[in-house]
Amino acid sequence: MGLGEQLKYGSVPYRWVGNTGFEVLMISSRKDPSRWIFPKGTIEPDEGPQQVVLRETEEEAGVTGSVQERLHYETVGKQQTMFLLQVHSHVENWLEVTNSHQFDAKYPNLISSSAQERERSRRWMSVEEAFLVAKQMRYV
């Protein structure tokens, strides 16, 4: 890791779709909304890797679930550890919640409290499509 660079933890949120398999959830990047990424962030004091995965996934993607297994992969130039996260529920009225004082109270450590900074697009996609997107983003 480079000087001052922090290890990031993230999730690959997924849900089962009937008998056909599953889909994964990707979110738009704040820096470039045309890029699709997985939720991730840095660890806070008194947090373990799985706790940061749950927190970042709810903050950035608006879903909650259970952390499954750790994924083994390398990213180009970044230190990241990703976990599969089986989605159990969506935060109701996600855009309204992220624009409220309730959100600020639950997540006081967010660097920016600007609603525009927090607003992201979410998109469920097939594993095949996510693989192509992730390959373009150098996740695989």
Image (cartoon, grey):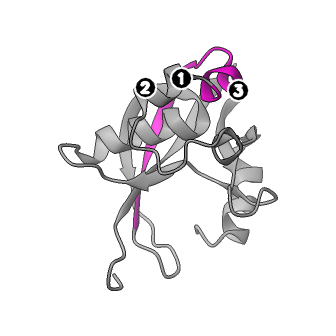
- The mark lying in front, picked from 3 and 1, is 1
Q: Residue at x 54, y 49 (%)?
A: 112
| Range shown magenta | 80-99
Asked whether, in this view, residue 27 is left or right of residue 110, the answer is right
Cβ–Cβ under 8 Å for marks 1 and 2: yes
Mark 3, secondary structure of its residue: helix
Q: Position of residue 101 (x, y in %)?
A: 53, 23
Magenta stretch: includes residue 94 = yes
Earlier sequence position, callout 3 versus callout 2: 3
Residue 26 in picture, x, y percent from top left: 67, 45
Callout 2: SS: helix
Numbered tag placed on residue 101 in the rendering: 1
Q: Residues within 10 Å of mark 1 (few under 14, many from 20)?
A: few
Query: Residue 100 location, x and y as percent?
Result: 60, 23
The nearer-to-camera label among 3 and 2 is: 2
- Dot 1 lies on which element? helix
Neighbours of disc 2 within 10 Å: few (<14), some (14-19), many (20+): few
Q: Which amino acid, mark 3?
A: Leu
- Check residue 61 for magenta coloring: no
> Residue under circle 2?
105
Query: Considering depth in this image, is 97 or 66 the residue closer to the camera?
Result: 97
**The label number, if any, that marks residue 95 in the structure image:** 3
The reply to whether residue 83 is visible in this rendering is yes
Where residue 14 appears, as percent x and y from the top left, is 58, 35
Is disc 3 in contact with disc 2, using a CB cutoff of under 8 Å? no
Name the residue type under label 2. Ala
